[in-house]
């Protein structure tokens, strides 16, 4: 009788040890999955940000309700980039960077000149650019950018006194991907 009890107890120990190993493995796997989810969420919120286009100022490149992904981490605006700009007490803007610090921007006879040369803009449906309130050649100051929408006749941008030159500190990020519709930015 004593032996039987000992044998049973021995089998029970192995079963308990196997259960402990299984539980320990499950716990480690769960911690790994949760850690990966937290890291993914942090990286998405720090480096990438989803936005939705509101309005028609970026036609034909972007249309109302396009869903985009921005790259936001240590980004420095460059000519031609499409950026989202944060505005105090107002909706953010989505615009194209035309000039960066040190560039001279001039709108003359409804054409854009950058550093004295006609700017080639294949992304525009209509090459006409009304000057709005922006009548003279202007140098973009350090720490600022000059932006315009691709739909030049229907865009509130750097040509308007209330927007003007945009501080690079106000740039949320660069549009890098269109999720919906699922196409490249150049395809539209």
Image (spheres, rainbow, N blue to C red):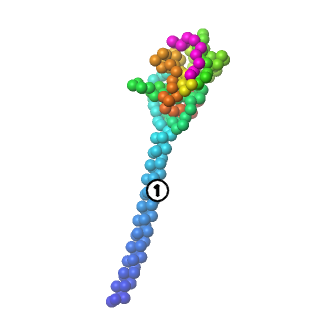
**What percent of the width, then of the height, locates residue 74?**
54, 37
Determine if the magenta segment contains residue 155.
Answer: no
Q: Is residue 55 left or right of residue 123?
A: left
In the foreground, 102 or 57 = 102
The quadrant holding residue 122 is top right
Q: Is residue 43 above or below residue 133?
A: below
Q: Residue at the spot x=59%, y=29% of the render?
A: 78
Q: Residue at the spot x=43%, y=57% of the render?
A: 30
Q: Residue at the spot x=46%, y=41% of the render?
A: 45
- Packing grade of label 1 (10 A; few <14, some 14-19, many >=20) is few
The quadrant holding residue 187 is top right
* Rendered-image quadrant of the C terminus: top right
Q: Residues in magenta? A: 130-141
Determine if the magenta segment contains residue 135.
Answer: yes
* Rendered-image quadrant of the N terminus: bottom left
Q: Which SS class for mark 1?
A: helix
**What percent of the width, then of the height, locates residue 135?**
55, 11
Q: Which residue is mark 1?
A: 32
């Amino acid at each position: 009788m004593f032996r039987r009890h000992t044998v049973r107890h021995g089998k029970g120990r192995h079963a308990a040890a196997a259960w402990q190993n299984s539980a320990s493995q499950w716990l480690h796997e769960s911690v790994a999955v949760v850690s990966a989810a937290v890291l993914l969420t942090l990286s998405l919120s720090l480096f990438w940000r989803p936005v939705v286009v509101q309005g028609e100022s970026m036609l034909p490149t972007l249309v109302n309700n396009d869903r985009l992904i921005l790259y936001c981490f240590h980004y420095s605006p460059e000519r031609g980039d499409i950026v989202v700009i944060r505005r105090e007490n107002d909706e953010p803007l989505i615009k194209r960077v035309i000039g960066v610090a040190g560039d001279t921007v001039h709108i003359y006879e409804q054409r854009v000149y950058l550093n004295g040369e006609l700017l080639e803009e294949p992304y525009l449906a209509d090459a006409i650019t009304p000057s709005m309130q922006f009548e003279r050649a202007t140098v973009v100051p350090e720490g600022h950018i000059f932006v315009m929408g691709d739909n030049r006749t229907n865009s509130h941008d750097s040509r308007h006194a209330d927007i003007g030159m945009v501080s690079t500190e106000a740039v949320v990020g660069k549009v890098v991907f269109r999720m919906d519709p699922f196409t490249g930015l150049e395809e539209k």
